[in-house]
Each structure stands twice: as structure tokens, then as C-alpha cells.
Image (cartoon, rainbow, N blue to C red):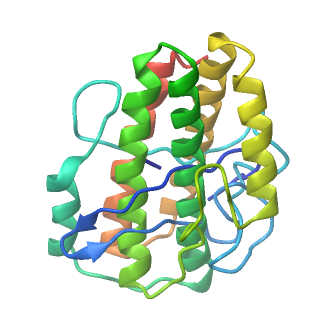
Amino acid sequence: MGITTRRAAILVAAGAIALGGVAVAAPALAGAGPFGGPTVTATSGPGPGWHGGMDGMGGMGGGGMGTGHGDGMGPGAGGCLSTVPAGTLSEAQKTTLAAMAQEEKLAHDLYTAFATRYDAVVFDRIARSETQHLAMVRALLDRYKLADPTAGKAAGQFSDSTVQATYDRLLARGSANLTAALQVGAEVERADIADLRAALDGLTAADVTHVYTMLLRASERHLAAFGDR
């Protein structure tokens, strides 16, 4: 559902899906979590795209195969993970994977909040997609035996203070009006895209590459749905 290289502004999504018998979790970029900032532990904050706020960040969007704005991957996409072998991740890549979970949750929670406030189907559809994205990341976290920083966290709640501040700031901005909410959505997706591209650089694990690539394609679709504002 979801978000490395720059970190500072967005993390999203919740949801767990069984993908090929593996429970899904979330990623974090090597050397920096999905929301930007310095390298952190696998259970800590976001990557570079988020560091210092959402404005002008990188990103970690989700890729999908479904139709419509949601760009969901559906059960079939998750099932593909069972046929892709696990690889080897560096400590930095493990950190990035964990951070991706927070990024996907952040996006999911923001879009869900906007969906209840505005009569715009795009938020509900993409929020459902982010749920699937988070599930895929969680499946990878489970496969590599990494802690899930989003486990047990309610909507809008994050274990990392920087991610929490980013969520609160973006939620406040998007609550002003529909146009502002769509702009926030576009910023989140741009950050996701930047973070995913950075995370793919130097990555050799086939399963993680598979998931990141799908998330990237989905984020590109989500950005288009938000109007690339």
C-alpha cells in the first residue's frame, strides 16, 4: 500500500496479506531509511526521501498490476513471491526494507484519512493498494527475519518520531482542502519513487528486487492518478 534515499516526509500503510505463505512487512533504503536521514536500525525510521519534511523529497511508492487508480497487485501478485528465491541483504539493505514498511503505512494511513474527508475515490482506491504493498513488504521482513516497525501500530501511529512528525504535518496540510490533499498524495508518491529507485541500486536479492519493482510501477501509476501536482 506502500515508502530509501531521501526521507523526510511520508510513510504509510498497514495491512497484512499472505503472499505465497509469507506474511508481508516493509522496506528501508540502504544507508538511510525510506524517509531520509542517516542509516538506522531495521526497526527505525524512514528513508532519505522523507528526511526534513515532505516537501521536495524522494519516495517509495507501490507498484501494482490491478486496474483503476488503486493499482493493486491482488493475491496473485503476492503469490508470485513464493516462486522467487530469497537472496542476501546487507545491513543497510535490511534497514531500508524495514523503513519501507513505515513508508507504506504512512501513505496508507494518510490516504485513508483523506478518503473519509473528501468525496474523491482516488484516495480509497490507492489506500487499498497501499495495504497490499505493506503486506508484500511485511512478507519480506518475515522471510529475512527482520522486525516489523509497524506491528501493532494503530492508524496514524508510528514507532519513529520523525515519521510520526511527517505524518502529522502531511495530514494537517491535506486536511485544508481537496486540492491540498491531492498535492500531498503526489508528494508522497514522488518520494516513494525516488526511494525505491535508490533501494534498487546495488540490490541483488531477487525477491526484494521483484517487490520493489512492482511497488515502483504502482507508485508511478499513483502519481499519475493524483495528477503529478
Side of 177 where 104 appears, left or right: left
Q: What residue is at 40 percent from the left and 50 percent from the top? A: 131
Q: What residue is at 67 percent from the left and 45 percent from the top? A: 10
Above or below, 23 against 53 in this view is below
Q: Nearer the viewer, residue 192 or 20?
A: 20
Side of 26 where 63 appears, left or right: left
Residue that protrudes farthest toward the right in the picture: 52
Side of 103 where 2 appears, left or right: left
Task: Please provide percent x and percent y for residue 103.
Answer: 59, 54
Task: Please provide percent x and percent y for residue 153.
Answer: 59, 64
Name which quarter of the figure residue 91 lies in: bottom right
Name which quarter of the figure residue 124 lies in: top left
Above or below, 69 against 105 in this view is above
Task: Please provide percent x and percent y for residue 98.
Answer: 56, 71
Q: What residue is at 69 percent from the left and 12 percent from the top? A: 177
Side of 51 where 128 appears, left or right: left
Let me know if residue 64 appears in the view: yes
Q: What residue is at 17 percent from the left and 63 percent from the top? A: 80
Which image quarter holds the C terminus? top right
Task: Count all numbered tags in the image, as a single digit.
Answer: 0
Above or below, 76 against 113 in this view is below
Task: Please provide percent x and percent y for residue 18.
Answer: 25, 67
Let me know if residue 221 appears in the view: no
Above or below, 173 against 39 in this view is above
Q: Nearer the viewer, residue 85 or 10?
A: 10
